[in-house]
Image: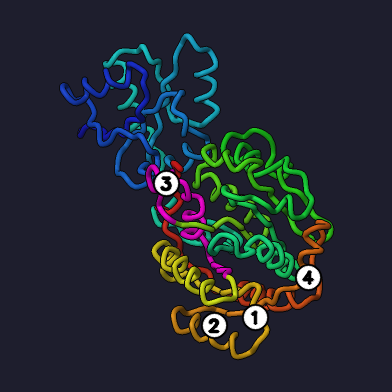
Amino acid sequence: MSEPEVALAFTADPWVEELHRHLSDHGGARVRSVVVEPSILLEESYDVLVVGHRWAPLTRALVGDVRARGRAVLGVYDREEWASRKHLVALGVDAIVESDAGVDGFVRAIIGAAGKRPEQTAEPARATDGRAGSLVVVGGPPGVGRTEVAIGLAAACARRHSVALVDADDVAPAVAQRLHLPIEPNLRTAIDAVEHGRGDLDACVISDPRSGLSIVAGVPNPNAWVQVRPGEVVRVIDRLADAAEIVVADGAGSLEEIGGSASRGRFATGRALVASAEVLVAVCDGSPQGIARLLGWVVDARGLAVKTPMAVVVNRAPVARFRRGELYEEITGSLGALEVVFVPYERRVSDASWNGEMIRNTAFTRPVARVANAVAAAPRRLRDASILDVAS
């Protein structure tokens, strides 16, 4: 019988180094990888994930994703911390072992866990049937009025479909503030409900009777981005899509890969949203400079989602027809789009924002409604599970 292959989650606990050294020198099992960033857990091939209860990314959702791919999870608890064993059992691990069991005890536990490997229930490439509803991501360069378009688009879609609006912007969350909604509950509490079972996701959703939307407010403070992992946001969206036909997410501003790993950099959430979307709606300013910034954003977006259908909203567009024509030719000549619409500057938009009201039947809402029709009619597409960065 061949030795089982192990992915070993790295922590500072002494048993981690001791086990790694023993397996490398004496065998019994083979360490395939030492995991620091959990994003590789769905990509690597191994039999058993060995993970301590203190490993920060360890959640019920992560255990479920690993097990769904036919890999067992062996949890390691500290007998001096009475709650650690209960915590691992609640997460749904396949087997547990004491941290002071010794290397022979660990090897026996690894072999036993490998024998309990669940059948694979999810393919590495996830199809759209893994998400019941469609994810529409509203993005574009910062400062172009993206949030207003996201709210208007969600409201337009809600006339014919059940819609959830998620403020996933971890740089400048503004949906709750724009609609004069409370900032609690929010995306952070929704993540706690989905990932850790702390509370009910339904209780984290604000029902807005004015628009018929189900709304998840953004993180209460932009500094909280370090507490939000991209994969967690995507999984919240997937859960919301079980009930909503369309989920509109505002949050794909800057897409540069800055700081840390690809799955934990500053704009990793926006990148994960773009990569996971069924449809992209790009918003830009109605000026030559605005188009130039849009095309730069599209280059980054297409690096993450090559074939995802895209619509373009030119916000604060000029009134002159020939200027709109020039902008239209530049956009359509540079990228294929489901729809290109022009939204003029309108004072009623500013008034509605000041009063926390929805905008209805104006020169702003009519072109946005055209985008909503195009979004609803867009075909579904296959998604690659690697974009989910379960670690993230």
* Amino acid under disc 1: Pro
Q: Which of marks 2 and 4 is nearer the N terminus?
A: 2
The residue sitting at 36% across, 28% down in the picture is 50
Q: Earlier in the sequence, mark 4 or mark 3?
A: 3
Q: Earlier in the sequence, mark 3 or mark 1?
A: 3
Q: Earlier in the sequence, mark 2 or mark 3?
A: 3
Query: Marks 3 and 1: which is nearer the front?
Result: 1
Name the residue carrying label 1: 318
User: On the image, which quarter does residue 224 sit in?
Assistant: top right
Q: Can you say which quadrant of the picture contains the N terminus?
A: top left
Secondary structure at badge 3 equals loop
Query: Marks 4 and 3: which is nearer the front?
Result: 4
Gap in angstroms between the C-alphas marked 4 and 3: 40 Å
Q: Observer-nearest residue: 56 or 67?
A: 56
Name the residue carrying label 2: 327
Gap in angstroms between the C-alphas marked 2 and 4: 23 Å
Percent coordinates x, y for residue 76 in the rendering = 41, 21
User: On the image, which quarter does residue 184 sit in?
Assistant: top right
Name the residue carrying label 4: 347
Magenta residues span: 256-284
Percent coordinates x, y for residue 54 in the rendering = 46, 23
**Does the residue at mark 2 contact the one at mark 4 (Cβ under 8 Å)?**
no
**Does the residue at mark 4 contact the one at mark 3 (Cβ under 8 Å)?**
no
